[in-house]
Image (cartoon, rainbow, N blue to C red):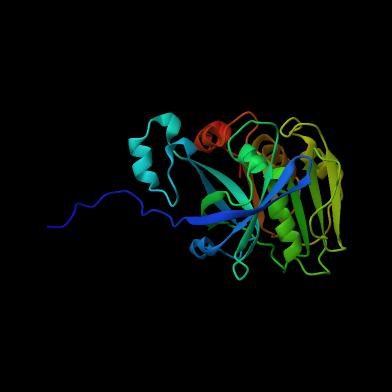
Amino acid sequence: MTEPATNRRAPRPQAVLTVRRREWLSPHIVRITAGGDGLSAFRTNDYTDKYVKIIFLDPGLGLTPPYDLAALRESLPPEQRPVTRTYTVRRVDLDQQILDIDFVVHGSDGIAAPWAASTHPGDILALSGAGGAYAPDLGDDWHLFLGDESALPAISSALEALPSDAQGIAYLETQDTGHSLDRPAPAGVELVWLDRDKPGTAPQLLASALAAGPWRPGRVGVFAHGERESMKAVRAALKHRDLGGGHLSLSGYWAYGRSEDRFQAEKREPIGQIEA
């Protein structure tokens, strides 16, 4: 007799990695390098905004990954159920079996950032992925990037993927005044750093810089990601610009004052919509 069909999705493969290094890139950004044989379960792609779902579980349960997430969500009380957090992969090297993820850290709020700030070599990191949807179109005449700290890994990866003669502008919103990327951008891409205090407190900053800045002729590829209200303002500003047939990749990575769980739920509500 066959088992009745269910609507449960097949579990996603989990890469179980070991933390190798923790490195502070700035006062509020820490890079975690992890790797090991478990990276063989990682499904990479060619997108420069590739992302993973990091799995967090109450260490008091004494469980080791990979986890049966469906079973745990059914059997555990709400406060002990596994949670996932979405992060962009800055770099992955399958030959060297290492992966870099950058975390924005602001105090002890949240789950992922405090973990990243205090983790040590030898700790375990479980994740699934990667997803992604964007890579710069090398046929574009120029490239436009807009984002805050949460988008810096994806923007950095995109800049790294551009040829040396690429042209463009990157508006980068940050709390840290160091104003540096971990790899040099092409000489023809202007970097415009926009300082503000706590992330999420200046939702018009990127849009205002875009409106006041130059607009180059030709086909432009746009990558704009960051805080949700900021991206709404950027989308409104872009309505007055001609992309020349170029592609637009724009979305909110997070929302000020919201946990990721609430942010993801609001994507189905009017407040979570960024007008196309």
Q: 198 or 274: which is nearer to us?
A: 198
Quadrant containing the C terminus in the rendered view: top right
Q: Is residue 267 left or right of residue 24?
A: left
Who's the residue at 64% across and 39% down the image? 113
> Can you say whether 17 is above or below 83 in the image?
below
Residue 138 lies left or right of residue 98; in this view the side is: right
Residue 230, given in percent of the width and then of the height, sits at 70, 37
Q: Residue at x 73, y 44 (%)?
A: 29
Query: Compared with residue 136, is residue 122 higher up or lower down, i.e. above or below?
Result: above
| Tally of numbered tags | 0
Identify which residue, 159 or 183, lies in the foreground: 183
Identity of the residue furthest to the left in this view? 1
Residue 159 lies in quadrant: bottom right
Question: For the N terminus, which image quadrant?
Answer: bottom left
In x, y percent, where is residue 252? 63, 42
Using residue 106 as the reference point, say whether residue 67 is left or right of it. left
Could you tell me if residue 239 is visible in this image? no
Q: 87 or 203, which is in the foreground?
A: 87
**Percent x, y of residue 169:** 82, 54
Residue 15 % position (x, y): 50, 57
Residue at 57% over, 38% down:
273
| Closer to the camera in the image, 276 or 107 | 107
Residue 39: quarter of image: bottom right
Q: Is residue 135 visible?
A: yes
Q: Residue at x 84, y 41 (%)?
A: 194
User: In which quadrant of the rendered view does residue 85 lie?
Assistant: top right
